[in-house]
Image: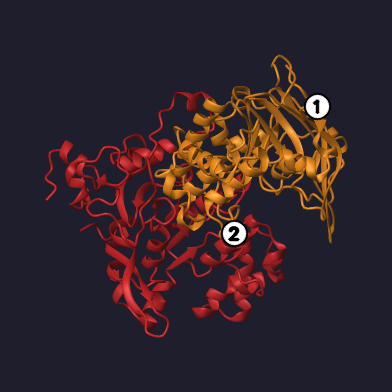
Chain colours: A red, B orange
Amino acid sequence: MSDSTQTLVEVRNLKMYFPITRGIVIQRHIGDIKAVDGISFTIRRGETLGLVGESGCGKSTAGRAILQLYRPTAGEVYFDGQNLTTMKGESLRRMRRRMQMIFQDPYASLNPRMTVGNIVGEPLEVHNLLSPKERRARVMELLEIVGLNPYFVNRYPHEFSGGQRQRIGVARALAVQPEFIVCDEPISALDVSIQAQIINLLEELQERFSLTYLFIAHDLSVVRHISNRVAVMYLGKLVELADRATLYENPLHPYTQALLSAVPIPDPAVEARRKRIILTGDVPSPANPPKGCHFSTRCPVKLPICDSVDPIWRDVGGDHWVACHRVDRELGLTSE
Amino acid sequence: MAPLLQVRGLTTIFDTQDGVVHAVNGVSFDLNEGETLGVVGESGCGKSVSMLSILRLIPEPPGRIVGGEVLFEGRDLLKLDQNEIRKIRGNKIAMIFQDPMTSLNPVLTIGQQISEALELHLNMTKEEARQRTIELLRLVHIPEAESRVNDYPHQFSGGMRQRVMIAMALSCNPKVLIADEPTTALDVTIQAQIVDLVKELRRELGMAIIWITHDLGIVAGLAHRVQVMYAGYIVERANVHDLYANPRHPYTLGLLRSLPRLDARTREKLTPIEGLPPDLITLPLGCPFYPRCSYRVPRCLDENPALHAVDGQDGHEVACWVDVTQREEIRA
């Protein structure tokens, strides 16, 4: 499908369903939450792929399923050419050293009863890297890399501010020298003046250690700033993926267009001129997504076919992927 | 015309185990009839506490309003007794909150919750209140209002709950609506719906709005005037165009520079504000922004600047010793 020297992660038709059960003693399976409902994309070595969408669209679940923190219901994830979804035990554990995660909530993702040294050193211990003595030196080096005082090594998480805690989370992710990091809303819980500090840190680290990021966020301005390519997700499916400039300047999918128009810009002169596309209604439940296109219930430009037939996820030229019947029609493509 | 609401020297503290937290340190501002005032700042800057103090919604203890006055319709709200302030709250001055789930009672239908204010403040009968409630739900564009009035909060989505909150706040035709981060918990497309609704209601009903937020983007399209708060002080205030086109406080400048913009042309490196907000227990003698400021001069360490007018710009005020347009930035 693509050049293996360039592609680091390839996701093929990934699905992640969570069962809905009824009953306490005998649990009957009565349905599924289709959190991720068949997504395909690639992440290139050294790039940042932004994954945006509103809450509940499945973007975080997708990130976790890619790392095999959840075992996907269907589909495959290839990391450096190897299929993670069929891997188990020791071989999967060895692969995990190469991919790490940074979490949203810097308060919940650090164990309050462990020192910073233990938190950052734990991945080294788990993967049997370095002797205990070397580990301590490595932890101090990592703290310095993320902009913390190395002598904080014996302190506990509660002694730090939100931004500093997020730096600890970044140091932990870097400990095992991964190639790929899933950043799951790493700045959403931080104050505005602190957000830029963490964004700059992530950018510096990417350059210094040749990291590949999957950057999951709901803030389109931040994603635009940090990403090379951007994917937009809605109700378990990808609706559009393109390089940053194309997606923000020439969005094709009506959901992407509405999403971009809804983001406020801190400039009253610009705001006064902008036209907003106000979507009606709310996102449907992922337990019972609409037939056909998932966006059909809110789409301002829908066609009759959208209620019944799933649009095809395809490259409409120049590596610009979109799943929309209207776009297909305008380009003269068949939707069957 | 005299302002609708005049706040003078409002000061609120909290007694905690670690010491006295100086949350609001002498805040003064006016709110004119029909105007929308944006109040911007980060968490802990006193933006919510100052507005809660106006309505005396600060839990006492540990909170205490230790100074200032809030003049509304010729009376000082801080001097009213509990019964009198209750007649103002939810009636002439209403408030909506950030989290619409925790601010609605889960065991009462939304009809009961909206009617309560109508029966209490406007002496309506049960049936009149019900009819008015349905009207209000229609006003905030809740579909099938006649049947939804009997639903419980959990049967509504986040955006719909915020609409219910707005209906409740508007039930008694308030003169002032205080909105405390009403869209922070909502997704961006739902946020756009709510902002659109508020603009429409403002046009129709003409109430004055105080919109509290940490998002400089939202107020740009919504507010007439904006005041920026830091460490319990108002550090800058201007009409919305001057504030964004010509910011004068280093903190406002810093906030604007640290935000990536959706319409930015190039991928510039962001300029974060280094350091952390100050500890409100031991407030510095000088300017609270001093340790993080890239324009500081020695004077800032010893004297805290008061809010004063910016030359040549009507209504633009700043609390800073330095003229940022005349001075080079210090870069660490």
Q: What secondary structure is found at the residue carrying circle 2? A: helix
- Disc number placed over residue B158 in the picture, else none: none
Question: Residue B213's spot in the image, x, y percent?
Answer: 61, 40
Give the image location of residue A275, x and y in percent. Answer: 40, 28
Task: State which mark lies toward you, 2 or 1.
Answer: 1
Front residue (pair B238, B261): B238
Report the amino acid beneath label 1: Gly
Q: Please indicate whether residue B146 sits to the left or right of residue B233 in the image.
A: left
Residue name at image x 63 percent, y 25 percent: B35
Figure disc tally: 2
Mark 2, residues whose alpha carbon is within 10 Å: few (<14), some, or many (≥20)? many
Q: CA distance from mark 2 to mark 1?
A: 49 Å
Q: Disc 1 is attached to a residue of which chain?
A: B
**Quick check: do tags 2 and 1 share a chain?**
no
Q: Which residue is mark 1?
A: B74
Residue A328 occupies quadrant = top left
Report in which chain the residue with disc 2 lies.
A
Judged from the image, the secondary structure of the residue bearing numbered disc 1 is loop
Q: Residue at x 52, y 31 (%)?
A: B201
Name the residue beneath numbered marker 2: A166
Tell me the crowding category of disc 1: few under 14, some 14 to 19, or many 20 or more residues within 10 angstroms, Cα based. few
